[in-house]
Amino acid sequence: MLMKCICKHLLKCPKSCFKVFDLIHKITDSLEAIYMAACDVIEDFYKDGVHYLELRTTPKENCPFFTQEMYIETVMKAIADTCSQKCKGMIVKLLLSIDRNRTSRYAEETLKIAERYFSLSSCVVGIDLSGNPKSGDVECFFPYFDYAKKIGLKLTIHISEVPDNFNEVEQLLKLQPNRLGHGTYLHPQKGGSFKNFKLLQDLEIPLEFCLTSNVISKTVSSYEEHHFKLFKEINYPCILCTDDKGIFNTTLSKEYCLASNHYSLTKEDMFNLSYDSINYIFSDDKKDELRTLWKQYIV
């Protein structure tokens, strides 16, 4: 009920999107609440038929009730418990998010935590850069991203969510992350620079698209005007995602249906879009297993 109310509010006030994220961050103020929230999200994806999931979470900073390590261990416990009980057979991995509006010290602490759990278990597989794109100096995080890649952590970065940010986009592309999020203004037809678009095409970094999120938050005017269409037309590596499924009241199945309806995708197109996404997951050791599973659905 709370999430439905939030979604209705976002439809009326899309500019409040990041305030909503802050609110959710505040109400998950106990390890019990964090555990329950993580379990619920995983179960929702499982019921939607998702076989492989990468959860993204931002370790809480300066919380008086628990440490960042306790937070991550709670999320990892939720993953282990849910996958061994209610969601058997589902593969769930964890990405630790760095908020671009926080300090380099915070990024360093998050990376240390990620490195520790990356070496201890197979659950943590990567780092995510996100947060309000209208503020924050991302260049201070570059040394940490370079180090993350050196030790084997994968990297996904939200990029080009605001127009005319050409220099930042170029610098982020040169980091050569494993995936890119949103990319709203990357394509020249959407205001992107030809130089950056050429660099993007040369690097072929897969793009994560969140249709409902972009429409509700008004970063795109409509599904018909969504930049996914432009990238799909040139056969660029595309991945459909949900963003925050609770806040935006969506599912991965819904995102695929929207893509099919608005961009005239056939059943074969839909299967290939899903199957090809396996190439871009951060768990290299699970790719063959998932490809075998997907092939069972070929008619």
Image (spheres, rainbow, N blue to C red):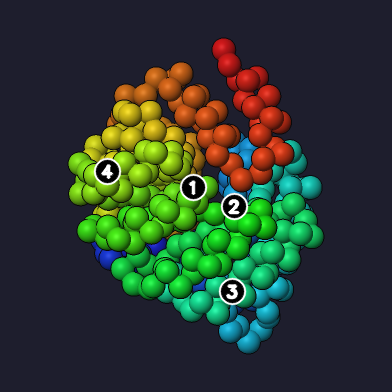
Q: Along the horizontal axis of the image, is 129 left or right of 88?
A: left
Distance from label 4 to label 2 (Cα)? 24 Å
Crowding near pointer 3: few (<14 within 10 Å), some, many (20+)?
Answer: some
| Type of amino acid under label 4 | His
Assess whether mark 1 and mark 2 are in contact (beta carbons under 8 angstroms): yes
Secondary structure at badge 4 equals: loop
Secondary structure, mark 1, is strand
20 with respect to 53 (left or right): left
Measured Cα–Cα span from mark 3 to mark 4: 32 Å
The earlier-in-sequence mark between 2 and 1 is 2
Q: Is residue 109 above or below residue 200?
A: below
Q: Which mark is residue 154?
A: 2
| Circles 4 and 2: CB atoms closer than 8 Å | no
> Would you say residue 254 is visible in this rendering?
no
Q: CA distance from mark 4 to mark 1?
A: 16 Å
Residue type at mark 2 is: Lys
- Say which of 156 and 210 sits in front: 156
Which badge, 3 or 2, is on the more N-terminal residue?
3
Query: Which is nearer the eye, 186 or 11?
Result: 186
Q: Is 206 situated left or right of 152 in this image? A: left
Can you give x and y, in whole percent of width and height, for residue 246 in the image? 48, 55
SS at circle 2: strand
Give the labeled residue for mark 1. Answer: 179
Q: Which residue is mark 4?
A: 187
Residue 294 in view? yes
- Residue occupied by mark 3: 108
Determine the image quadrant of residue 31.
Answer: bottom right
- Look at 77% across and 56% down and name the residue there: 121
